[in-house]
Amino acid sequence: MNHDNYDDNYIRSILNGVKSIAMVGASPVNVRPSYFAFKYLAQRGYDMIPVNPGHVGKSLLGKPFVASLWDIGRPVDMIDIFRNSSHIMPVVDEALTLSPPPKVIWMQLGARDDAAAEKAEAAGLKVVMNRCPKIEYGRLSSEISWMGVNSRTLSSKRAPIPTQGMRLSLNRMSVGGGATAASDRAAKNKSEPT
Amino acid sequence: MTDRLPGFSTLAVHAGAQPDPTTGARVTPIYQTTSFVFNDADHAASLFGLQAFGNIYTRIGNPTTAVLEERIAALEGGTAALAVASGHAAQVVVLQQLLMPGDEFIAARKLYGGSINQFTHAFKSFGWNVAWADPDDIASFERAVTPRTKGIFIESIANPAGSITDIEAIAEVARKAGVPLIVDNTLATPYLIRPIDHGADIVVHSLTKFLGGHGNSLGGIIVDAGTFDWSKDNKYPMLNEPRPEYHGIRIQETFGNFAFAIACRVLGLRDLGPALSPFNAFMILTGIETLPLRMQKHCENAKAVAEFLAGHPAVASVNYSGLASDKYNKLARKYAPKGAGAVFTFSLRGGYDAGVSLVSNLQLFSHLANVGDTRSLVIHPASTTHSQLDDEAKVRSGAAPDVVRLSIGIEDKEDLIADLEQALSV
Ligand SMILES: Cc1ncc(COP(=O)(O)O)c(C=O)c1O
């Protein structure tokens, strides 16, 4: 798996396939990026579970916080890790002890741990690093285009009638287009120790 | 089609646009509306809090304008873009994100005269100080760097004389100084030069010129390359500190590699207000569909006209980097191999008076203060666009009193040459 550059179909199949997402490091503070992503994904119909030992007893948009992945108490499809790179491995180790294990490990924008990714992939999980599922969902549905963002997709097909006033279908037929090579290079240089 | 990435002309027609989901309209509709209804109170709150993507009010964003933004971001190889009312508005919005009162930026001396004025006078009243450097002397940029420098501003092809800037060399100065390089790519358009490929962090345009291309609409745009790390050294509080106007959001941390474009939208455009009209966005989008074809013709005609002038006895010199003999030809071959643009200057042996009489004798060329129209245009910069500069600054910016500027259109080149021929022989 090339973790510098994901094929749109790989990301699309993950976002289409998973139904439940446990967000490790979710914050109840409504200006934190994890809160934004949690709320967005919940509104797109994902079954969201906030995981944060510091907030047990509280809830996030009506969903009670749990302290760890073990406390979820039911199968979960994807673990979205909102922690920095140095805190990834223990979460992956914990995820791999779940039964059944999750199908996907997703590390947030800025987070990357290649050894943890390798371990998860060896156990048959799909891995995405240094991406935000909210941004990827918005990009592939072209909803993010409302903000002038380069979705890197083209389509000549009429999109499904929008719900909630937005262009939301992930199943929009599209081809790649509008590469952002310079930004990808800058991200790679930043993640490589100099 | 997963491995194939579409080429420039395909992006020029398609990027950002798709058939309208409600009506099936194939051409991007003009959403001529000030505001957009919310689904409910929570949706409204999410939009205002930047938690959801969507439309609120046309000063902040508009669906027609968003197609233009995505299209130009794709053509430039950037992560996102923000369209505004004019090229000048784009410059203000960019620098407002970078500079606090008392800060500095470095700008190339060879710039559009209006930009020289804006930087020297208008920005001074904001407490933003410009330090000038000579694009032909890279060391002059290095010498201008101070601890308060927050950015470097250059034009890829400089107005009025069409000189080519060594973007990579200046990008290296910016990288060492830890500041972003901003390139005004108006005269080149991404068809001729893509500054991001050469190290630019931010690209701005006056869409009024070749991108719109038909002389009918003002517009400007800011493209975020997604390359600059705004959190480094904590030099950029607009990007990196909790924003009180958004309850403490940090823009870079929230928006990643398109944070600069978002800052320009939600801190710049929202509060300063220079929004582009959706109608103008539509006109400019239509223009962009033919950008590659027009630029080929503009460049072909410009080269033919420059060659004609270079051989004319009444002409003292021609500054067109597409000519093999030109000082900037080497840079033109490196940065703009498809063509050296269509704006250039020449000087007449008869000096100022000969320039004035040429302008009045021309019959196809229009005498006006614009460039990048389908029509061929002529102007005498010293008495118009660059008239506010003193004589020394006029010469330095390529607008000496004997200089005439042409913007070559897409007419038949034989007709343009015939018009110049008759006007020079009167
Ligand atoms: C190179 C360049 N930059 C910026 C501008 C300003 O653009 P606008 O007139 O759209 O504000 C111009 C206008 O002539 C220009 O030629």
Image (tube, coloured by chain):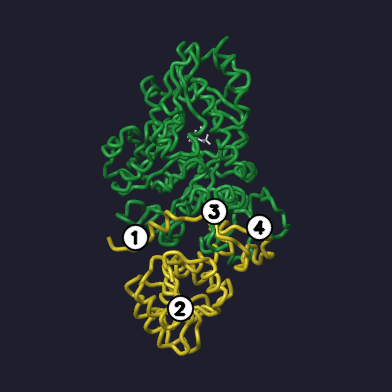
Chain colours: A yellow, B green
- What chain letter is assigned to the residue under label 4? A
Task: Using residue B253 as the reference point, say whether residue B409 is left or right of it.
Answer: right
Judge depth for marks 4 and 2 and give the one in front: 4
Q: Earlier in the sequence, mark 3 or mark 4?
A: 3
Residue under label 2: A79
Residue under label 3: A148
Indicate the position of residue B176 as horizontal and vertical percent values: 28, 47
- Helix, strand, or loop for circle 4? loop
- What chain letter is assigned to the residue under label 2? A
Q: Please, what is the three-letter code of the amino acid marked with disc 3?
A: Gly
Question: Gap between marks 3 and 4, in whole Å?
Answer: 19 Å
Can you tell which mark lies on residue A156? 4
Q: Please, what is the three-letter code of the amino acid marked with disc 2?
A: Ile
- Helix, strand, or loop for circle 3? loop
Q: Please, what is the three-letter code of the amino acid marked with disc 1?
A: Lys
- Count of numbered marks: 4
Question: Gap between marks 1 and 3, in whole Å?
Answer: 25 Å
- Helix, strand, or loop for circle 2? strand
* Circles 2, 1 touching at the beta carbon (< 8 Å): no
Q: Earlier in the sequence, mark 3 or mark 2?
A: 2
Residue under label 1: A190
